[in-house]
Amino acid sequence: MRIVQVLPTLSRGDAVGNNCRAIDGILREEGCDTQIYAGIIDQGVPDGVAKLFSEMGRLEKDDILLYHLAIAFDHDMRNVGGHTIFQYHNVTPPHFFDRYSPFIANACRSGLEEVRSYRDAPEMCWADSDFNKNDLIEMGYTCPIHTIPILVPFEDYEKPADLEVIKRYDDDYVNFIFVGRVVPNKAHEDVIRTFAWYQKHINRRCRLFLVGNASLESYVNHLKRYIKTLGVKNVIFPGHISFNAILAFYRVADIFLCMSQHEGFCVPLLEAMYFHIPIIARDTTAIPYTLGGAGALVEDNDPIKAALMADRIVNDKALRDAIVAGQDRRLADFAHDKIKEQILRELRAFI
C-alpha cells in the first residue's frame, strides 16, 4: 500500500506545498511508502522531494490518494485508482483578480468549477478550516468531511534569524507586520490605510513590513501608487528574502495586522501567535476559525478602529499580555503532534 499526495504545483514557501511536505514527513516517520507528485515542481524545491505527476501511473486498489484542492489541475483525479481523499484548501474568488490578472482570475474560476465537479468523487474530504468545510457542503459534497488544520512544523521557527535585519529594525519604532502573498484578496491597501492613519494621527515613529511574494506586478504597482497618494512613509516590501530574514521580521514586530478579505486558513496567524505578536485581524472567512477567540477582531476595514486598537495594544501592557496569552492558548490547538495524530487516525480508516 502506498500513500500518494498530488497537487497541481509544488512551490517553495507556499502554504499548500509546505503542508503537503509536512504530511509526507510524518508518513515517512511512520514507515509508510509515500510519494508526492506535482504537475509543476518549482525550481526552488530541493531535488528528490517530489516527482512529476506524469510519472505516477495508476494506483493499486489499496493505495491512498490525497489530492490537494487549491487551484485548477488539468488531470482528472477520478480516474487514477486507489482510495480518494481530497484536502480542500479553498480557491480564491476570481473577482479579486479581474482587475490585475485575467489569467489568474480564469485559473481561479476553473479551480472553483473543478471543486464543484468533484463533489461525488472522494470517499472523504479534509478541510483546513470550518469555513472550508462549509464551502464543500454548500457545493454539494456528501462524503465525510473532517476539519484538519494545516500541519505546521513549528520547530522550523527556532532556526537562527537574520541578525542584520534585527540590528537594523530592533529600535524604539512601532513595527507593524503582515505576512502573505501580495495579492488582492489579502487587501494590502487596507493594511496600508490603517498604518497611514496610525502614522499621521498617533505615532510617526513606526514602520510597516509587508512580507511575502510580490510577483503580481500590477497589484504591487497599484499599492505603491496608493502609498504615494497617502503620503505614508516607512512602508517596506522586503521582496524575495530568506527564511532566516522572515524569522527576523517576526522577531522585531510589535503588531500583526491582517485586513484580508478572503482566507482559507491563514498560516501567518499561527506564526504571529508563535512569536507572541498581538494580532489585529478582520473578522471574515476562515480568520475567526483560525484565531478561535484569540487576537483582536475588527468587524470591517475601518482604518481608524484598527489604528486605535493598535495604539491601545502598544501602550497597554496588561491588554497586550492578555491578548498574547489568549493566542498562546489557541496555538496549543495546532500543536504538531496533535494534528499529526488526527491525520494518521483518518488515514487508518483506509488501512
Image (cartoon, rainbow, N blue to C red):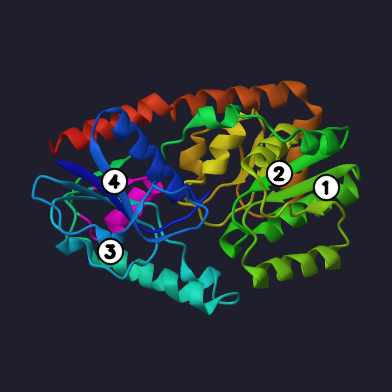
Mark whose residue sits in front, 1 or 3 = 3
Work out which quarter of the rendered image holds the N terminus and state it: top left
The nearer-to-camera label among 4 and 1 is 4
Mark earlier in primary sequence (4, 2): 4
The span picked out in magenta is 125-141
Instruction: List the residue tagged with mark 1.
Output: 198
Residue drawn at the location 60% of the way across and 74% of the way down: 100
Mark 2–mark 1 Cα distance, whole angstroms, equals 14 Å
Could you say whether the residue bearing mark 2 is in a helix, strand or loop?
strand
The residue positioned 42% from the left and 28% from the top of the image is 336
Say what amino acid the circle numbered 1 marks.
Tyr
Q: Crowding near pointer 4: few (<14 within 10 Å), some, many (20+)?
A: some
Which of pointers 4 and 2 indicates the residue nearer the eye?
4
Q: Nearer the viewer, residue 299 or 333?
A: 333
What secondary structure is found at the residue carrying circle 1? helix
Does the residue at mark 2 contact the one at mark 1 (Cβ under 8 Å)?
no
Q: Position of residue 255 (x, y in %)?
A: 72, 38
Determine the residue located farthest toward the front in the rendered image. 47
User: Which of the two discs, 2 and 1, sits closer to the camera?
Assistant: 2
> Disc 2 to disc 3, how far (Cα)?
40 Å
Residue at 39% over, 63% down:
71
Q: Nearer the viewer, residue 97 or 344?
A: 344
Which comes before the other along the chain, label 2 or label 1? 2
Amino acid residing under circle 4: Gln
Residue 54 position (above or below residue 251)? below
* Residue designated by label 2: 177
- Out of 205 and 23, give the one closest to the viewer: 23
